[in-house]
Image (cartoon, helix red, strand yellow):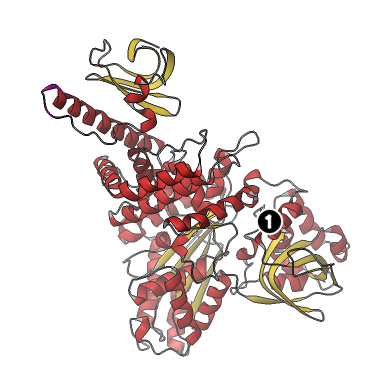
Amino acid sequence: MLPLGSSTFSQIKMNNITLKSMLKEFSIKNSLSEKDSLQFEKYTSYSLLANDYYDSFEQDLVSTGDCIGVDAIAISINDILVYTLEAAKSLTLGQFDVCFNFIQAKTSSNLDLGDYLKFLQTIYVFFTGTEHDQPIELKTAYEIKTHIYQKAAKFRVLPSLRINYVYTGDGNILDSNFSTQINAAVNSIKRVDYCFSSVESRLIGGVELANFYKESLNRTTKQLMFQRHVALPKLASATAAYLGVTKCNDYIELLKNQSGNINKGAFYDNVRDYLGDSNQVNADIEKTIKSKMQRNLFSVLNNGVTLVAKKVVPSGDVFQISGFQVVNGCQTSHVLFNNKEHVTDDMYLTIKLIETDDIDLSSSVIKATNSQSLVMKEAFATIKPYHKQLEDFFKAMNSYGHRFFYERRPHQYDDDESVLNYEIVSAPLLIKSFVSVVLEEPHKVHFYYGQILKDYNNESSTLVFDESHHPGLYFVSHLLASKAKDVAIKNKLNMWSYHLALLVKIILQINLNVHDKFTDDKITKFIERINTGFAEAATQAISIIKAGSLRKNEHMIPEKTELLLESLKKQKRDMYIKASNASKVGKNTVAIKNIVEPQDSIAKLERSQLLDGRYRVKKLIVDSGVVSFNYGPTNYVLKDENSDFNGAKKAECTIIIKTGRILSITD
């Protein structure tokens, strides 16, 4: 067995100064305070996974905690990471692809055979053992795996498996006995029947890990042979622009990542995911590539691709391209890459290359170059001008003591050392905050954000990122969600953080109805209310969640959201009854907090804002002289000690109100 290195990163004598510097940068950017080995595990997971799964990667959810044998596991379905069984079920309704990613990260610069074999054995047992055989930290992942294979009839191909053992050494195995044992263990995994279409086992050293990290931040520089190009006339907001052709083989090399696979991170800004080989357009592209008669006509039969890069350095026909994105041509790129064995040197591709770091120009290029073909509406959601308003509003709120920065484009703040990761608000994250707090459906936010947009936005209406919305709606919802997340983690209620945020909103009497008109002044008053009352409200909300005896994965069930909201309403009614009874026996009036929201108060009825008349209401309850019901988006509570309807409970009914009293209740 080779010698075991030191257990903490700071004590290791490493020759790779670059890796040390990157780990330090990552730890500062992410405000990490754990011991060095845990920081290294997070750095490794981010470096290997964030580039491929940027919009679904969640650092804390891929981690396996104290699990012995494996530090991180990531299961992707159709290139979306899933962390719960319910999320997996939603993505396996039709045909699907799966990739299992296992990671073990060691800060030692020396390889330990025992650790390596333990890692491989854990993976082998994960696919061959029973649920009883799994460490508790892998139970959820095992449930997801079991469901996936139960849906095997819908596999496009068998799942792929990536095994990544990472350490800080040079990445080479010099001991032949070591190699023999590792290869034998990997082969045992490969021989598991009917499990995998491919198994990729990688030993990753310090230099390669540093390159993965740079790639995850889109900091890599790639070379492109750009034959027969011309410089376009000077463009506003663009440093330079070029139009020309390149060999398809050279373009394929440009797309390769550190592992030799297609660099999914190069397509963040493309509004369409790869539509698959079965798509008719893609099938036609593939047919052209494989046709000996047509392949040399590829450059005239195909519309080409558009690249936007942060830096372009031309030298003759050789271009050095840094921080590039393929903003148009996702389908062409994937079909070429997937059929690279059929690509010949007489095949050329037309490329439009734009050098700019202007986000607005990039968004304009994306919209213009993709509008000719069918693109899903939600794909364009994050490039609308409205997002500039959100970005500006979030920055303006820094002066109120809340440092949040809305990220219109991926990696927008990566190079700004003054902005920490927890301060960055991505579009997917903001969508989840808005849906849970404003639209009051926190059970939906654990699904992929693209699906959430589909649910709320359609051709006739837009509920998320509607241009009529005051940006403050989004800021307040994220402020609540962010603070709720911190409290939920401390109380081991991680999966219920969005429910917690919703309950706090109601307790603090913050009305965020999307149909209301808001002013900056009203938004700042909401923020002041959050600043002063959040802690007390969160304590009340936590007690409600804990009292619900909720089980694992129930955070994705709509009925559980309703249960929590009903529990809060009951708590309000009980407090009101208690206060009312106390006043009857001559006690001093009790100060009642949070019984009803200002817009829902009894005083509101007394001011005749609900005038005498007939109303169709929902969830009516009459209990001990207290009446509560929903009318429109508002919950009303009023006192009616002489009510003739005590004990009434209706899911939906018609009521007649006169002088603050209910005269009749009919179905």
Residue 530 place in picture, x, y as percent:
36, 47
Q: In the rendered structure, which segment of residues is drawn in magenta?
A: 584-589
In this view, the residue in front, 654 or 54, is 654
Q: Could one spot residue 250 in this view of the protein?
A: yes
Q: Does the magenta stretch include residue 587?
A: yes
Residue at 39%, 78% in the rendered image: 106
Residue 229 horizontal side relative to residue 462, left or right: right
Q: In this view, does 632 lie above or below 208?
A: above
> Which quadrant holds the N terminus?
bottom left
* Rendering quarter of residue 14: bottom left
Q: Does the magenta stretch include residue 359?
A: no
Residue at 42%, 36% in the rendered image: 511
Residue 211 place in picture, x, y as percent:
56, 78
* Rendering quarter of residue 62: bottom left
Q: Residues within 10 Å of mark 1 (few under 14, many from 20)?
A: many
Q: Which amino acid does label 1 sit on?
A: Ser
Of helix, strand and loop, which mostly describes the magenta segment? loop
Residue 221 horizontal side relative to residue 42, left or right: right
Disc 1: which residue? 363
Residue 383 place in picture, x, y as percent:
64, 52
Q: Is residue 88 above or below residue 565?
A: below
Residue at 34%, 12% in the rendered image: 659
In this view, the residue in front, 655 or 5, is 655
Residue 483 horizontal side relative to residue 645, left or right: right
Residue 187 place in picture, x, y as percent:
48, 72
